[in-house]
């Protein structure tokens, strides 16, 4: 037996991009159903980065879910670059005419969006199995899924593929109409989360002869640290003590002195890749977030790019219903990709600048250190890092 439902937008994926899209559409009076193959608890258990650009902060405010972010998030006006054993601050606030970022975990963003959706009584289906998209190249797309032994059909006007890198939406796009670009990096990030105070009030990006390290944070009492490790390493190879010792070896003396260690809450290894899909629209199905692109985490762009995809997509869909215009829908892919490639370039460049690449030898380290030395002593160089890190304006380059 098949149960049929009708909505305006079927959103696949209840991560931050799908939930944010649902919230923005709800604010505009547009109906949407969100499908998620995992449980809500599983979605909230995923540990991700949490540096939010000003554009993302503004978007969460627009969606009506920014209150806790402003109350609990940590506002940062700069960050440190560490190389040759010394730290140098990039003053983003000064270099970008007052812009800043806020450190607020992706898990918390997801929780806020989940709570808002639940409070509004909006439909989200978790544990939706065998999700399939159909006839998205026609005026009557539909989505099918299975739950509790029953097959369900959702008839809709549009399908939003917010279902991540391994989701069904990109996989369902016609092979002759999609192109994928990918670069896989020869190392990963070993991340450790601990209930310890951060080593520094702002982030530290470290370029050392032993490899890259990042000192980040989730709150005034919870820290997140990363080490560059070979792809052959496994989490079980790294005890907490071994992690802390290696981190110390990659930091400057002052940071070592202030580092507070403790048992890990979570440890994991993430491979690094640059990935982009072109286009991001297939008839009445749109890709957004990790379904369309992946960036190395070095530039803190993943969640922020997903948010701007959703901004462009929600605006286009709202224009369709309120103004009877398809201009935004037609421009969606091009607008997104222009911004995506800029962020991909910055993330690739920053990754290449800060990491040790196997087989490149000591001369590569010297090149990196010379470039870093130039960047911190050149206002133009420092501004280039700062304005890309805080996020380019949504209309950047439109004139």
Image (cartoon, helix red, strand yellow):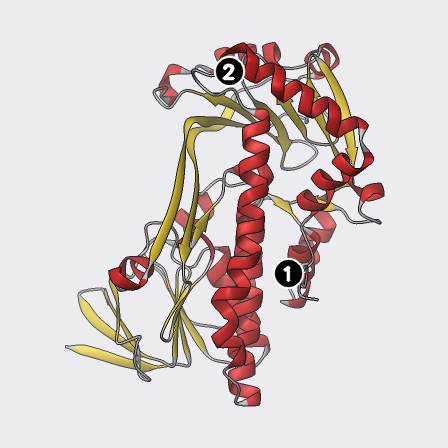
Q: CA distance from mark 2 to mark 1?
A: 35 Å
Identify the disc placed on residue 150.
none
- Residue at the image position 28 percent from the left and 57 percent from the top: 171
Residue shown at 82% from the left, 35% from the top? 379
For residue 1, say whether it is visible. Answer: yes
Please name the residue that numbered disc 2 is placed on: 243
Q: Dots 2 and 1: beta carbons under 8 Å? A: no
**Quadrant of the image containing the C terminus:** bottom right
Viewer-proximal residue among 260 and 59: 59
For the point 67% across and 67% down, which residue is it? Answer: 62
Residue 188: x and y in percent read: 44, 27
| Placement of 332 over or under 260, stated as above or below | below
Q: Nearer the viewer, residue 307 or 379?
A: 379
Q: Farthest residue in the bottom direction?
A: 324
The residue that label 1 is drawn on is: 60
Which one is in front, 260 or 154? Answer: 154
Q: Is residue 291 above or below residue 121?
A: above
Residue 113, can we see it? no
Crowding near the residue tagged with mark 2, few <14, some 14–19, many ≥20 C-alpha atoms within 10 Å: many
**The quarter of the displayed image where residue 292 is located:** bottom left
Disc 1 element: helix
* Residue count near mark 1 (Cα–Cα under 10 Å), binned few <14, some 14–19, many ≥20: many
- Image point (67%, 45%), residue name: 388
């Amino acid at each position: 037996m098949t149960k049929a439902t009708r909505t305006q937008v079927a959103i696949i994926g209840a991560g931050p991009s799908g939930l944010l899209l649902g919230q923005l559409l709800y604010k505009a009076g547009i109906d949407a159903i969100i499908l998620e193959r995992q449980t809500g608890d599983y979605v909230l258990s995923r540990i991700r980065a949490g540096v939010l650009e000003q554009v993302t902060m503004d978007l969460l405010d627009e969606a009506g879910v920014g209150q806790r972010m402003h109350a609990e998030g940590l506002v940062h006006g700069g960050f440190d670059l560490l190389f040759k054993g010394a730290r140098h601050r990039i003053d983003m606030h000064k270099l970008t005419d007052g812009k800043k970022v806020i450190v607020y975990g992706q898990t918390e963003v997801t929780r806020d969006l989940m709570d808002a959706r639940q409070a509004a009584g909006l439909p989200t289906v978790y544990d939706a199995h065998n999700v399939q998209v159909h006839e998205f190249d026609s005026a009557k797309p539909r989505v099918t899924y299975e739950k509790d032994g029953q097959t369900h059909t959702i008839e809709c006007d549009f399908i939003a593929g917010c279902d991540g890198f391994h989701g069904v939406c990109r996989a369902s796009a016609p092979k002759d109409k999609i192109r994928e670009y990918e670069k896989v990096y020869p190392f990963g990030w070993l991340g450790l989360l601990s209930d310890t105070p951060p080593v520094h009030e702002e982030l530290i990006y470290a370029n050392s002869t032993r490899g890259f390290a990042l000192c980040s944070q989730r709150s005034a009492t919870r820290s997140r640290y990363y080490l560059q490790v070979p792809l052959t390493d496994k989490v079980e190879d790294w005890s907490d003590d071994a992690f802390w010792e290696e981190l110390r070896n990659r930091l400057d003396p002052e940071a070592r002195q202030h580092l507070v260690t403790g048992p890990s809450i979570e440890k994991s290894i993430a491979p690094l890749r640059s990935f982009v899909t072109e286009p991001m629209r297939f008839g009445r199905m749109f890709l957004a977030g990790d379904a369309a692109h992946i960036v190395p985490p070095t530039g803190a762009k993943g969640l922020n790019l997903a948010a701007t995809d959703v901004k462009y997509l929600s605006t286009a869909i709202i224009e369709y219903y309120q103004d009877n215009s398809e201009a935004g829908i037609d421009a969606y892919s091009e607008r997104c990709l222009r911004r995506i490639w800029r962020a991909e370039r910055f993330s690739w460049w920053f990754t290449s600048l800060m990491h040790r690449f196997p087989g490149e030898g000591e001369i590569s380290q010297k090149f990196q250190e010379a470039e870093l030395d130039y960047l911190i002593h050149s206002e133009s160089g420092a501004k280039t890092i700062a304005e890309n890190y805080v996020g380019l304006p949504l209309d950047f380059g439109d004139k």
